[in-house]
Amino acid sequence: MTTTTGYRATTTGGPLERWTFDRRDLRPDDLAVRVTHCGVCHTDLHALNTPADTPGAFPVVPGHEFVGEVTAIGVDVTDFAVGDPVAVGNIVDSCGMCDPCRAGQENFCRDFPTLTYGGVDRHDGSPTLGAYSDSYVVRERFAYHRPTELDPASVAPLMCAGITVWEPLRRWEIGPGSSVAVAGLGGLGHLAVKLAHALGADITVFTTSEAKASDAYRLGADQVVVSTDEVAMAAAAHRFDFVLDCVPVAHDLSPYLRTVAMDGTLCVVGYLGAIEVDTLDLLVGRKSLASAGSGGHRYTQDLLDFCGEHGIVADVEVVPSAQVMTALERLRRNDVRYRFVLDLGDL
């Protein structure tokens, strides 16, 4: 086993504390990774505020979008060598046998994928502990080659926020001639705009904040619509082939559905709770309502390769890992543009 230092919480809403623990010995298809940077995700906030009596919720070491370098490999590893730059997302194992897994969509594993933290190891039943730490052990299948031409810290959020918006953009074949709207210009939305722009789409950003207009244009938007402006929203009716909803809180989908063109799709990736939909908003125009989440092997390396080719990374604020509580509190207040990343070099 390898001794690792990281940050853990032991109860709901409690502070993260430095903690020393052991990573497992390498299995034949494992990589050991020295973690250099880890993104701070809204999922981390949710995990840290899970009710304390939830089985397996605590202790928790968060962190599921990270980059680093390979420090050791198992005897059966063929695609990585010691010293390789690597990136890992929020899935670290799956059954490998079901139809989604065989299609490279391990994020939809019928047996549920093993999460980078807060999951259960499929071999020994131990809890998975995340990458707010200086090392991680991961199966080769769930590690990805990181483009060396990109800033490592800015790559880390691609492994969660980036892949979450990339899979639907690929699935719905967004490209030149596509009319796309992105709702919400946060951690997910700012990457959706960058990626859709690089794919050649015409992009409109829906935002509740007029102050974000200049940022939206900088990121690649062709038009910005303030979603609380009823006149502007009415003018956008039936315009978009594809609307990617990245708003992270419960909200009414009807205004966005009305902007979808005939046979178009509204894909919700920001908020994953219960929603209500007026069927008429779908019926008029034969529209589709869809969702997506995370990403499998099929699209994740595709995303990294595309970002390397086009120079796309997340807009990040890098902070020393010792300031993790400050980063989480600011994230709670939405005081970041657009993603915090922890520098683990101070552990």
Image (spheres, rainbow, N blue to C red):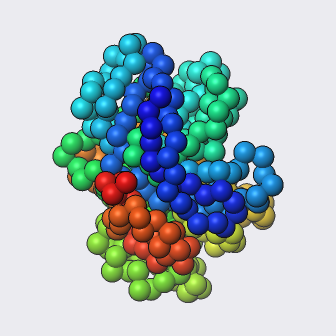
Can residue 72 be seen here? The reply is: yes
Of all residues shown, which one is farthest toward the top? 76
Name the residue at 48% across, 19% down: 27
Query: Eyeballing the image, is 297 above or below 261?
Result: above
Residue plotted at (44% across, 42% down): 4
Q: In the image shown, does 188 or 320 lie closer to the viewer?
A: 320
Q: Quadrant of the C terminus?
A: bottom left
Please state if 130 lies on the left or on the right of 302 as rendered. right
Q: Residue at x 57, y 58 (%)?
A: 44
Among the 4 quarters of the image, the one containing residue 75: top left
Would you say 36 lies left or right of 60 here? left
Tally of numbered tags: 0
Q: Position of residue 240 (x, y in %)?
A: 50, 62
User: 169 above or below 262?
Assistant: above
* Frontmost residue, 211 versus 116: 116
* Residue drawn at point x = 56 percent, y = 43 percent: 129
Residue 72 percent location from the top left of the image:
33, 26
**Residue 303 shows up from this direction:** no
User: Hey, which quadrant is residue 91 in on the image?
Assistant: top right
282 relative position to 347: left or right: right
**Location of residue 36 in the rendering, given as x and y in whole percent from the top left corner:** 33, 49
Task: In the displayed orientation, state which residue is furthest to the left.
Answer: 149
Q: Residue furthest right?
A: 53
Along the viewing direction, whichever of 188 and 232 lies nearer the viewer = 188
Residue 58 image position (x, y, % from top left): 68, 51
Rendered view: 306 above or below 113:
below
